[in-house]
Image (tube, rainbow, N blue to C red):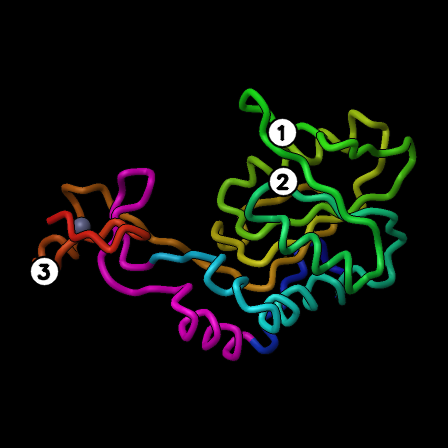
Amino acid sequence: MNSKNDSSLSGGNELLKIFQQTGALLEGHFLLTSGRHSNFYFQCAKVLQYPQYTEMVCKIIANKFKDFEIDTVITPAIGGIVVGQEVARQLNKRFIFAEREDKSLTLRRGFSLEPGEKVLVCEDVVTTGGSVFETIEIVKQNNAEVVGVGFIVDRSNGKVDFGYPQISAMKMDVISYLKDECPICKEGIPLVKPGSRKIIV
Ligand SMILES: [Zn+2]
């Protein structure tokens, strides 16, 4: 339980079932925002629209950090907010979030961090970890201390390392293809842009 990249797959099958039942994890032929094609699409918000599932997945993060000294939970907006709020509720800690202003994440709404404050950073989905790294920088700029990072889905399949104790509820290896090399295109299956329900062809 003390390894740096501790990730829980206990209850993994149950989680996977929830992700499929809520339509968060779709199988088919999808156009990703990167322009690449994939046979999987994942939309975490579809799980987090149900408070009982939010409670369940956030418990994995809260359990990992329950014995850590933590003052505050922070997340980047928007996807992370519901995760941070629920983890903070379970740990009975303060919760704040950073949001984009002129492209960079910043604390607004009177949120602040004290020097030496111990902070847990949370997020919903991590692919490259850009927003989490930016949030870590905000904590450091305020001379507060990052104690760990918790997130629901690791889409880098464990490749992202934030340099602090970290946990994801689930790891996914997202395989994607260049348009011209896509085997699903070759099968003639219509291409779908997720969220729009539109077939692109
Ligand atoms: Zn394709």
Image quarter of residue 116: top right
| x then y, percent, for residue 16 | 47, 73
- Which residues make up the magenta segment? 12-40
| x then y, percent, for residue 141 | 78, 25
State how far apart marks 1 and 3 are (Cα).
Answer: 42 Å
What is the number of the mark on residue 76?
Answer: 2
Density class for disc 3 (Cα within 10 Å; few <14, some 14-19, many ≥20) is few
Q: Secondary structure at mark 2?
A: strand
Q: Look at the numbered discs 2 and 1 and tell me whether their residues touch, using CB distance below 8 Å.
A: yes
Q: Look at the numbered discs 2 and 3 and tell me whether their residues touch, using CB distance below 8 Å.
A: no
Q: Please name the residue that numbered disc 3 is placed on.
A: 187
Density class for disc 2 (Cα within 10 Å; few <14, some 14-19, many ≥20) is many
Identity of the amino acid at label 2? Pro
Please identify the residue farthest to the front as the structure is shown. 109
Image quarter of residue 170: bottom right
State how far apart marks 2 and 3 are (Cα).
Answer: 39 Å
Q: Please name the residue that numbered disc 1 is placed on.
A: 105
User: Residue placed at 33% from the left, 64% from the top?
Assistant: 26
Residue 129 sits above or below residue 153 on the image: above
Identity of the amino acid at label 1? Leu
- The answer to whether residue 128 is magenta is no
In the visual, does 103 lie left or right of 63?
left
Residue 15 sits above or below residue 76 on the image: below
| x then y, percent, for residue 129 | 56, 40
Query: Which sits in the foreground, 174 or 159?
Result: 174
